[in-house]
Amino acid sequence: MTFLFAINHQLSTINFFSMTLSQELESRLSAALAVVLGEPIACTVTAAADLRFGDYQSNAAMVLAKRFGKNPRALAQEITTHLDLTGLATSDIAGPGFINFRILPAAYGKRVEKLLRDPRLGVPATGAGKTVVVDFSAPNVAKPMHVGHIRSTIIGDSLSRIARFLGYRVIADNHIGDWGTQFGMIVYGWNHFRDDDAISKDPIAELVRIYREVNLRIKDSPEILDVCKNELVKLQAGDEDNLAIWKTCVALSKSGLEKIYRKLGVKFDHWLGESFYNDRLHGLVHEFLENKIARESNGALCIFSDGNVPLEDDPFKVHKEDGWTDNPAIIRKADGGFLYATTDLATIEYRIDTWEADEIWYVVGVPQQLHFRQLFDAAKRWGKVADFKHVAFGSILGDDRKLMKTRSGENVGLIEVLDEAVVRAAKVIAEKNPDLQGEEAAKIAEIVGLGSVKFAELSQNRLTDYVFSWDRMLALHGDTAPYLQYSHVRIRSIFRKLDGPFDALAAEIHLDKDEELHLARLLTRFGEVLPAVLDDFRPNLLANYVLELARAFHSFFEACPVLKSDEPVRSSRLALCELTATTLGKGLELLGIEVPERM
RNA sequence: GCGCCUGUAGCUCAGUUGGAUAGAGCACCCGCCUUCUAAGCGGGCGGUCAUUGGUUCGAAUCCAAUCAGGCGCGCCA
């Protein structure tokens, strides 16, 4: 009996410890609601929009007033009299019937002490037991990565990191475009325009040059295109010469891509490109035909979906009047070739059957949303079940407000952007902190410059289009990566000056000044923000959070001396600094942004 | 023609999914280094949330229409 009780007690304690403040307020509020309204009712408590109203707020009274035919303020009053917030918070009623909560400083202090012991920093493992495949970056072989590729790569990498921290088994898969029409052109170019010297010097640049050269020639004499198509047919039929050229080009491209990823700190678990699925395509198309999911139209094999339900007597016919021609996904061309959709279906099959994916996230631009709608629909009808998500992002536009096209050579290359970012960061270092020299300065410039590019991308809503601008992407002042990195550096500086040992776990937290309280408030909120990021795949929520945290720290830093204050304030502040450093560091790590020791 | 995304301060963008007096950064103005890194801190200026209707206790947010920009709609990926 006693033993069982002890276990139960421990379980509930563990549970209690892992609850965020908003969850704890919710559980206490719903207990009060049960008393007042006579039935258990779920309710939500959110962080207050404005600190003047308190730390958290609930609109439960206003929502429920109508359902129970009561006056909202009177109901709120009734609820608060039954609300037990002992040791946690105070509450009051305001406006049309909000219940506002103000967390007691002592309760924040306790939370901070707990977080100092928690390697998860209060973040619940919402993804435990689930496998997700994240499909991002996916550049085409032998085409240069330009600024347009940056969104998928950076957003995808960050989402992968966050999912991993939330307990998911994450498989980051780089589905590179290593098979397809462009290889006809590349083989042709390889045979006609290759410069072996250039290949040995800079293989990527030479591949890019070859590809552009072919495109230019085709403009002048379109008949070359037919020759290219023929090379492609030979390649796909297994022609040894062409296959060898293909293998060489893919290998060269990959090594170039790996250099960029290494620089960006982006890692993949797999690189299963389109070619990997080539052998499966025939059988797959056959299956779709047999199951009457696809049908022939104008010589091509098509899957008609778009919400059209097949009729029972004729599965190819659909209810919609113009359904015969409406938005089909083509899985086999009239000439027998396979397409994007075919490979993607084979990829889904592999990911579900081999990796047992529960979810698949595609970090791909908005323009492809029709494709994914068709793809997910086809997969579903094929019996491949998983939670498919198209994590779409807006386009990067040129100065003319038009989409940046891959084909036109005038695009800004990704490497160029990254290099320029580092150059600009180096300039600022020389100006702000000339003591830093040589290799150390170069390393910091790299961390700061690359961080700026990443943060510029991650701090905004992924769906908005934007016009590419150097100054915007490489800004180093204001709400930028250096601001965040600098706050971390300031904390490190404190600990560098600290002589003698310090044990944060032994510290008692006292929150007397507003700046201390606010810092603690934000520190306890990390566990609420992070899961919300994956609700709608919005890394910018995390970016906003770390900005707020850094801002709170800078204010604290100016207002509250740490090393020069007396005990017990000194230890309390040191512990606050330590938790800020770990939380900020973790937040930045999840955004893929490094932190320098000094700057 | 059909469909999708976007429209918020001079500029670049947030806005916790329907909450209270719409927030940041840049730019501009004022103040703060003898004190843990001034890449910082404190304060100020700046708004008809594209427009018009509607839904309700309550709308930047939801619905409808209009205007403007971007994108997608059969054999590229």
Image: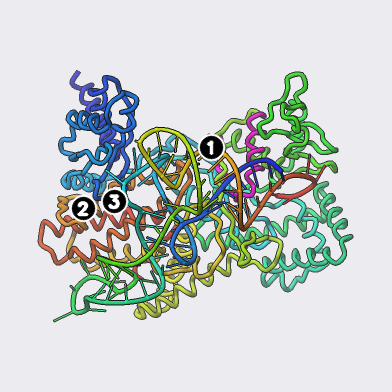
The one nearer the camera, A48 or B58, is B58
CA neighbours of label 2 inside 10 A, class few (<14), some (14 to 19), many (20+): many
Residue A321 drawn at (x, y percent): 75, 30
Which numbered mark, 3 or 1, is in the foreground of this view? 3
| Identity, as a three-letter code, of the amino acid under mark 1 | Glu
What segment carries the magenta color?
A356-382
Q: Chain of mark 3?
A: A
Would you call the spot at circle 3 few (<14 residues within 10 Å), some (14-19), or many (20 or more)? many
How many angstroms separate mark 2 from mark 1 (CA)? 39 Å
Question: From the viewer's perspective, is residue A378 above or below residue A69?
Answer: below
Residue A422 percent location from the top left of the image: 48, 71
Q: Is residue A404 left or right of residue A473?
A: right
What's the residue type where badge 3 is placed?
Answer: Leu
Residue at image mark 3? A522
Q: Point out which mark residue A359 bears.
A: 1
Q: Which quadrant would the N terminus of chain A be assigned to in this image?
A: top left
Q: Is residue A257 a member of the stretch shown in magenta?
A: no
Mark 2 and mark 3 in contact (Cβ < 8 Å)? no
Badge 2 and badge 1 in a common chain: yes
- Dot 2: chain letter: A
Main SS class of the magenta portion in the image: helix
Query: Which of the 4 image quadrants contains residue A387?
Result: top right
Amino acid at the residue labelled 2: Leu
Q: Residue at x 52, y 63 (%)?
A: A263
- Residue B46 vertical placement versus A299 (above, below): below
Q: Quadrant of residue A502?
A: bottom left
Q: What is the distance, in whole Å, between disc 3 and disc 1 at their CAs?
A: 31 Å
* Residue at mark 2: A517
Mark with earlier residue (3, 1): 1
Percent coordinates x, y for residue A400 in the rendering: 63, 65
A364 left or right of A250 in image: left
